[in-house]
Image (tube, rainbow, N blue to C red):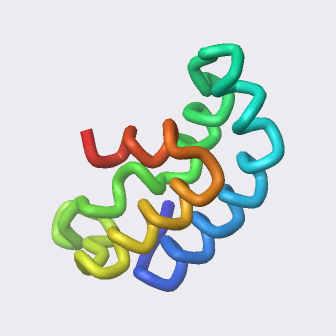
Amino acid sequence: MIRDDAEALRTAAELAEEFRPGASGRDARRELPRAELDRLTATGLLAVTVPAEHGGADVSAVTLAEVFRLLASADASLAQIPQS
């Protein structure tokens, strides 16, 4: 579970490095990034906007934008998921 902005950014950067190598191949094959989405979900990064009083990290808007940027730098498909 991600607890704060710094951990959210660190996790997003680590995932970006992990996802980057296969991104162009997935895109060329028009393949949904299922394994990557499972990994993204498992980290808790998709829940970083949950308010602290409900057990979430409640990250700032600036941090959330940086999370999107980091993910998009590796795989634009994955960066679309958290904002949906």
Q: Residue furthest front?
A: 28
Q: Is residue 28 above or below residue 24?
A: above
The residue shown at (71%, 65%) is: 14
Q: Is residue 32 above or below residue 82?
A: above
Q: Pinpoint residue 19: horizontal percent, then vertical percent.
A: 72, 46
Q: Quadrant of the C terminus?
A: top left
Residue 47 spot, x, y in % from top left:
35, 53
Image position, residue 63 (x, y; %): 36, 78
In the shown orientation, is residue 57 left or right of residue 70?
left
- Classify residue 46 as left or right of residue 25: left
The residue at 77%/28% (across/down) is: 25
84 sits left or right of 42 in the view: left
Outermost residue toward the right? 21
* Nearest the eye: 78 or 51: 78
Above or below, comparing residue 3 to residue 26 in the picture: below
Tally of numbered discs = 0
Foreground residue among 14 and 68: 68
Point out residue 53 in the picture as x, y percentages from the top left corner: 17, 70
Give whichever of 82, 39 is nearer the camera: 82
**Residue for point 49% across, 71% down:** 8
Near-viewer residue (58 or 84):
84
- Kindly identify the residue that appears in the image at 64 percent across and 40 percent down: 39
